[in-house]
Amino acid sequence: MKEKIPVIFIHGFPLDSEMWEEQVQYFKDGYDVNCPDLSGFGKSKLDTPSEIEDFAKYIFSYLTKKRIKKAALCGFSMGGYITFAFYELFPEFVSALIFADTRAAGDSPMAKEKRIEAIKMAKIYSMSYFVESMPPKLLSEESMKNEKLVSKVQKIISRQKKESIINALKAMMDRKDRYSILEKIEVPTLFICGEKDILTPPEEMREMSKVVKDSEFVEIENSGHLSNMENPEKFNSVLCDFLKRL
Ligand code: MLT
């Protein structure tokens, strides 16, 4: 029997592995699906302090524990920053890359200011600040009318730990600009982005894909930033077509 291709889904901020529920259901029979909670998120304990590179090393130790020698990495947003760092550190362990609603560049000065503000808010209001403020950034206006989806996103956010959120904000703020990695990517690469993503807009992702040799870019309609949760049917079918070709 042919061995199943390992796929590692790396979640975004301030979420955990449950964001990939629809992908787990869809891909679990055909692929070796892995959805780790990053350290400090979901059911995982925080190893402080963690930089983006430490999260990449955390994924590497996950692979080692599972004896996975090569995997397709699918990183969403913050998970994408970690995927870039992983590819920089451990390229020989990567068979394909999927970047969903993310960017290779580092934080702009304005983005850094927003992180500092968010850290302050986390210290004062803890997770309630993120439960209120994040959904309209993560979801399109249309998706914000989907009460079930909004409450699922809020439920995931509300169970995260303040310390982990502050740690991740610092890690993202200090992360390296990895735009120069794009032209060094030697594996098949897929860029996916929600058409109404206001955090990591499709135009920016399309430009990134032009720099990567063997790559394609697909826009997901009816979706904001959280494309895999807002339009899972389209996200899964695009990812499925890509994985089939590996
Ligand atoms: C995410 O979805 O992981 C975050 O929006 C990433 C970020 O804040 O840069």
Image (spheres, helix red, strand yellow):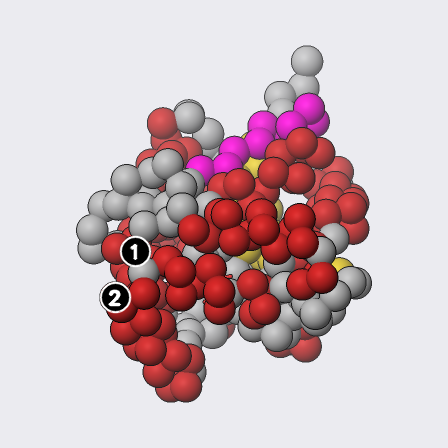
At 20% across and 51% down in the image, what residue appears?
Answer: 48
SS label for mark 2: helix
Task: Tell me: is circle 1 under 8 Å from ligand 1.
Answer: no
At 46% across and 52% down in the image, what residue appears?
Answer: 157
Q: Residue furthest left?
A: 48
Residue type at the position of mark 2: Lys
SS label for mark 1: helix
Task: Please tell me which of labels 2 and 1 falls first in the chain.
Answer: 2
Q: Mark 2 points at which residue?
A: 123
At 59% across and 68% down in the image, what residue appears?
Answer: 136
Is-magenta flag for residue 34?
A: yes
Task: Tell me: is circle 2 under 8 Å from ligand 1.
Answer: no
Residue 156: percent from the left, percent from the top? 49, 47
Question: Considering only vertical position in the picture, is 245 above or below 140?
Answer: above
Name the one closer to the observer, 214 or 169.
169
Task: Specify the label residue 212 is tagged with.
Answer: none
Q: Which residue lies furthest to the bottom in this view?
A: 109
Residue 152: percent from the left, percent from the top? 58, 47
Task: Report the quarter where the C terminus lies.
Answer: top right
* Mark 2 vs 1: CB contact within 8 A: yes
Residue 194 visible from this viewpoint: no
Question: Which secondary structure type mostly characterizes the magenta part of the structure?
Answer: loop
Residue 176: percent from the left, percent from the top? 36, 70
At 44% across and 38% down in the image, what residue appears?
Answer: 36
Specify the segment rendered in magenta.
Answer: 28-36
Residue 20: percent from the left, percent from the top? 58, 42
Q: Mark 1 points at which residue?
A: 162
**Horizontal placement of 121 versus 69: left or right?**
left
Question: Considering only vertical position in the picture, is 180 above or below 95?
Answer: below
Residue 138 visible from this viewpoint: yes
